[in-house]
Image: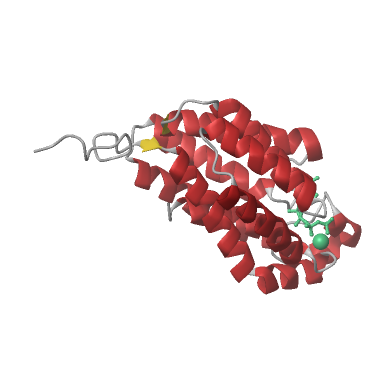
Amino acid sequence: MSHDLIGPHDRSEPDKISVEMLSGWILEFGRLVTAQKEQLNALDAAIGDADHGTNLARGFHAVTAELELTPQADPGALLDHVGRTVVSKVGGAAGPLFGTFFLYLGEAVGNDPGLDSRRFARGLRAGLAGVVARGSAEAGDKTMYDALAPAIDAIEAAALAHHELPDVLRAGLRAAESGRDATIGMLARKGRASYLGERSVGHQDPGATSATLLFTALTLI
Ligand code: ADP
Ligand code: MG
């Protein structure tokens, strides 16, 4: 049997995340935010200004076009490129926050072509630190943080327990969904929704909803 057919990302390294997988993650997220643009706008209409889906869909359309034109060679370069485009093309509060997430993630994962899940988890943790550096959200403020933080905790715990990659990523999605759902009962303390005070309670946060789509997309790579 020829070994020529065995590439670097085959079953011999089942727990590695390749640059192609990361690129697939971003493209899948772009498809999801585009497909759910109206739902995200509707959530934002209730406690914001109804543009969250439009902001993300427009920005990730640009990201997708650039990625298709200029494929990136390694994880760090890819995520840095994505982060820069998101910061410049996605409007609203969420643009700089999502963009910073990808910039810090890219910086943390570096140019190693095959990431293991522990290194990826450390990268996600750095991405979350970027979101906090930019927007100072804390747990319970009813923001994207409330989906991102539990998802990253779950991914980190599953990676450290040496679970297989698909299980690690599924654990992240489950935790993101619970975190997203918990924002319904929260009172917004950051961003536009915070202007509503008590009236923000009872509505699901749009940014926590789109952040959850990041983890949906991860389970599809
Ligand atoms: P804008 O509020 O400027 O219209 P978007 O509608 O695109 O921006 O995004 C709103 C989302 O951004 C919120 O649902 C919330 O999750 C997130 N967000 C707002 N401010 C912050 C912050 N300081 N930290 C983290 N996330 C935030
Ligand atoms: Mg908005």
219 vs 43: above or below: above
In the picture, measured across the screen, residue 104 lies left or right of residue 155, that is: right
Q: Quadrant of the N terminus?
A: top left
Identify which residue is drawn at 71% across, 59% down: 56
Q: Indicate how the structure is coloured in the image.
A: secondary structure
Q: Position of residue 109 (x, y in %)?
A: 54, 28
In the picture, measured across the screen, residue 204 lies left or right of residue 24, that is: right
Identify which residue is drawn at 45% across, 43% down: 20
Identify which residue is drawn at 61% across, 42% down: 149
In the picture, measured across the screen, residue 58 lies left or right of residue 213, that is: right
Identify which residue is drawn at 23% across, 37% down: 6
Query: Residue 60 versus residue 1: which sits nearer the camera?
Result: 1
Occupied quadrant, residue 212: bottom right
Q: Position of residue 209 (x, y in %)?
A: 64, 60
- The image quadrant where one finds ligand 2 is bottom right
Q: Position of residue 93 (x, y in %)?
A: 81, 51
User: Is residue 5 visible in the rendered structure shown here?
Assistant: yes
